[in-house]
Image: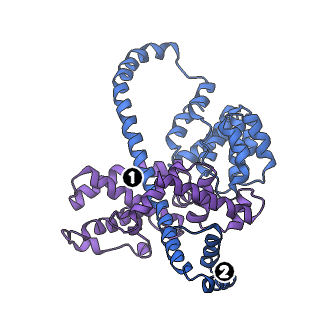
Chain colours: A purple, B blue
Amino acid sequence: VKNKATIAAIKEDNERVIHELYNSSQAKFVNWIKGKYKIAPQEACLEIYQRSFTVLYFNVKKGKLNDLDASIETYLFGIGKMVVREWWREASKYKEDDLNEAMEDLSKIDLFGDALNQKSDKFELTEQLAKGMNEIGEPCKTVLQLFYWEQNSMEAIAIKLNYKNEQVAKKKKYLCLQKLKEIMRD
Amino acid sequence: MNATEEEINLFDDLLSGTAEGKAAFNKALTNDPSLAQKLIDYQNFKSAFEASEILAFKNKLSSWEHESSSKTNVFKLWFGAIAAGLAIIFGVSYFFFPSPSKESLIAGNFTPYDNVITVRGNKVDMDDAMNAYQHKDYQKAIEFFQELPKNELSVFYLGESYMALKKYDKAIETYRQFSNPDHGLYEVNTFHLALAYFANSDDELAKKLFEKIEEEQGEYASQATALLRYL
């Protein structure tokens, strides 16, 4: 029941639950990374933890982790193992059979390498967009979030935001895109 | 990306996958071949935008990290002083205040739950009510919540508003309508229902519910255990 409640809360973006989950698993996860994979720098361990937590969050949101047999924390550690594998892949420094074992339930998850890997071609644009969205303010933030992040139709956005009709919502979205471009230009 | 409003609408309709969208784009493309490149640019922009949600979330995690490290520093500074103070006060207060009042127990265990509603999905209908709630205008919030269709969120926050105004019988009546054990707010709703029973002197019901919360070992188990000592 607790797993289900946590998953429901994550899907609803209950920040308190997400924050608590983030805090409660951190120390154990970082110690595990340090002990098992001998990754010593605290900063690197935190980066791996944050990536793993991000992957967990978005896969839950996208419905790829619904009926979990084990605890959420177990899956977080399973994802952590996959993130470590990515982490080491470039340097090919670390090869251990254990790293190649993935949990069955995690076979379909997305590690969001394009978004999180700073070497991706689009990373700079992605970073600028994330910063721009942080600065743009309402109602533009919600309009763009609903369309580009949550993939709502313009009709649905008009209903949700009480716009007169779909055309008004489209106009608003276009003006918000222009505003975002200006912020990114500055 | 230098597309006009009309072109962006054309691309969005095409990318939504409808036959009409495809037909309209093909027709426009025959008149203006430069649309092909503009579409590629827009698709790149769109995928970078989608990825920015992931990055924005990760940035939020980093901000929590900074928040908690600054809190830890403040905590470290104050901890020594508070601990020393408590060592002196405890001996005195133990004799002067042998048992906390029911009112202070409720106040110590109840804080109106944070506004966790964002402008997403059908929750936008709750904006007025949540706005009043966030500004601690609980009476007004109650009026708004009562107008809304009944769901877990409107029921829970209506209960919270009654509780904040110390209208415990109304809070009980409301919290009891929350029936979905899979919902993320179920645990806090149950704990606040138990607190409302306790405040309303429905001691038997409060005891039963605190025991259940204690048994389930969830987020409020330790608070329930502490409160059971007063029942």
Disc 1 residue crowd, few under 14, some 14–19, many 20+, Cα 10 Å: some
Position in image of residue A87 (x %, y %) = 28, 65
Q: Which mark is residue B124?
A: none
In the drawing, does residue A169 fall left or right of residue A109?
right
Q: Mark 2 vs mark 1: tell me if same chain.
A: no
**Residue positioned 64% across, 46% down in the render:** B189
Q: Residue furthest left?
A: A93
**Residue under circle 2?**
B21
Image quadrant in which you'd find residue A119: bottom left
- Decide: is A17 above or below B53: above
Q: Is residue A133 left or right of residue B55?
A: right
Distance between mark 2 and mark 1 Cα atoms: 46 Å
Left or right of B222? Residue A161 is right
The dot on residue A25 is 1
- Dot 2 falls on which chain? B
The kind of residue tagged 2 is Gly
Say if residue A73 shows up in the picture.
no
Q: Three-letter amino acid code at disc 1?
A: Ser
Residue A179 screen position, x and y as percent: 57, 54
Q: Residue B158 versus residue B201: which sits nearer the camera?
A: B158
Residue pictured at 43% horizontal, 51% vertical: B61
For this view, does B228 lie left or right of residue A95? right
Q: Chain of mark 1?
A: A
Looking at the rendered structure, the secondary structure element under dot 1 is: helix
Vertical position of residue B164 compared to residue A23: above or below: above
